[in-house]
Image (spheres, rainbow, N blue to C red):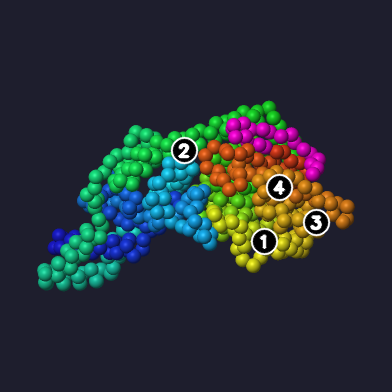
Amino acid sequence: MFACKATIFASLGLASGVALSTVWPTEVPFGPGEARATITLDGNTSLDAGAVGLRKQIEDTPEIGPLKLGVTLKPGEIPTLPGAKPSQTQAQGGRRQSADLETVFSSEDERRIQQYGELYRSVSTQSDDIKHALGRHLLMLSIGSSLFFATPYVFRHEIVASIKSKPVRLLVPTAALAFASLALPTASERNWEPVSDTYAGTPLEGVEVSGAPAEELVNRYGERIISFVKDTDAFYSESETAAREATVGRTLLGQRPEDERYTTVLFFTDNHCNVGMPSILAMIADKASADLVLDGGDTVFSGSSYEDYCVQRQQDAFRRYGLKVVQSPGNHDSPHIADELQRRGAIVLDGNVVQVTDLTMLGDADPRSSEFASGLQQRGDESLSDVGAHLTETACVSGENIVLLVHDKRAARQAVESGCVDLALTGHTHKRNLETVARPDGSEGFIITGGSSGGAEENSMTYGPLQANSQFMLLSIDNGLLRSMQDFTLTTNGDLVVGQINDQPIG
């Protein structure tokens, strides 16, 4: 009787778990896109990339009786990474096309190595998110397996009594168990090869790969990819150390007794997915005891989900120091990136007045979009002038001492000229500038345009060590008025140049 109950419960419970984990799949973040998670019985976490090949790694996964659970990830098509040289078809209509196998493996140039390196880094950065998603998926099996046990006792008793009277009915749960075994695949018969010692100490340590393309990527490009990632990490790590040393004995804005009366902010813009700079920016903000961090937009390059990890790296860096970030989306950002920034704790300006610490902030998204190879395009019917008019009206009606944060200064000029805004912070040009705006009543306002904190040059990516100087600044603000500013430049050699504090900024 006990054996009969155990067979019924185990078979129907496991089958119901399989059904739930199948009809309720888990989408897992994976580099440029997402992967679909399915449960296996081989005890491995496997990546099935179709024609590109497979990889697997033994994991400490749950067990149900003799069954060792595992998970297989099956990614969708991987879009062309931002920065890839577009083909004629890719450029037409500004649409991103999926990369075919020939495109992925046809070139060994340095840009391709950088792209693979950034893909590797993005998946590595997302490892915790992937593990959590997989854990939730395995939980689906456990929940599903318990559904049968959650049914009323009378129902379970009737099933047992029915099978006891006609043992042939035992075929039902037996068939269910067989279905579960078929639905949960075990490891495929393949020629698996372990990766080389090149990957020791990396997330690929202990991984096995199968399939010619996968071996091609690992064996042909692997050492160069890992070298690129290590060299990039070393550059920013050494630059951060040098930056710390450069500030020793130097007075930073925010450290003086008189600065305590005002709000000190770190202002940067156009980081363009540089994942090395945020830790240096956050360190400077912390040393200056900054009250707030202001991001002038173009946080990423194309606004795709691939760049979620850029947002993650940026927000994690500032969160380590307890710093709040306010961002105004640029033309290279997207609604998706804005959502991701908010999900990770940033305040994204949307045309409404927001009070943050002692600052009253206003800003809105750039009405244009810039995806790779598509040029500058309007998102909708609104123009920069329309955005500027709306922000001016909002600022004037509010009557507050507003600091305006927008990506392009053309959306800020009207508000400053009106006298309703005394200070506007902008980006977009990648050139640092301070402009004094004379107004009819004889007063002056300021429009500050930041350089690129990511060292971005026109039509170039920010992968790897800095390709151009990184620029950012500290500002002291009092009731919407600019009191002091201090410029910083991190050179391509990794040296930090600390500017003098300017208590009377002039254009």
Q: Which residue is mark 1?
A: 351
Of 495 and 136, which appears nearest the observer? 495
Q: CA distance from mark 2 to mark 1?
A: 39 Å
Residue, disc 3: 417
Q: Nearer the viewer, residue 390 or 132?
A: 390
Please identify the quadrant where the C terminus is shown. Answer: top right
Q: Amino acid at mark 2?
A: Val
The dot on residue 449 is 4
Q: Amino acid at mark 4?
A: Thr
Q: Earlier in the sequence, mark 2 or mark 3?
A: 2
Residue 110's spot in the image, x, y percent?
47, 40
Inspect the image, locate mark 3, and give the three-letter code of the amino acid beneath it.
Glu
Place residue 17 in its image quadrant. Answer: bottom left
Residue 5 in view in this figure: no
Judged by depth in the image, the label closer to the viewer, 3 or 1, is 3
Q: Is residue 358 above or below residue 146?
A: above
Q: Secondary structure at mark 1?
A: loop
Q: How many angstroms separate mark 4 from mark 3 (CA)?
A: 16 Å
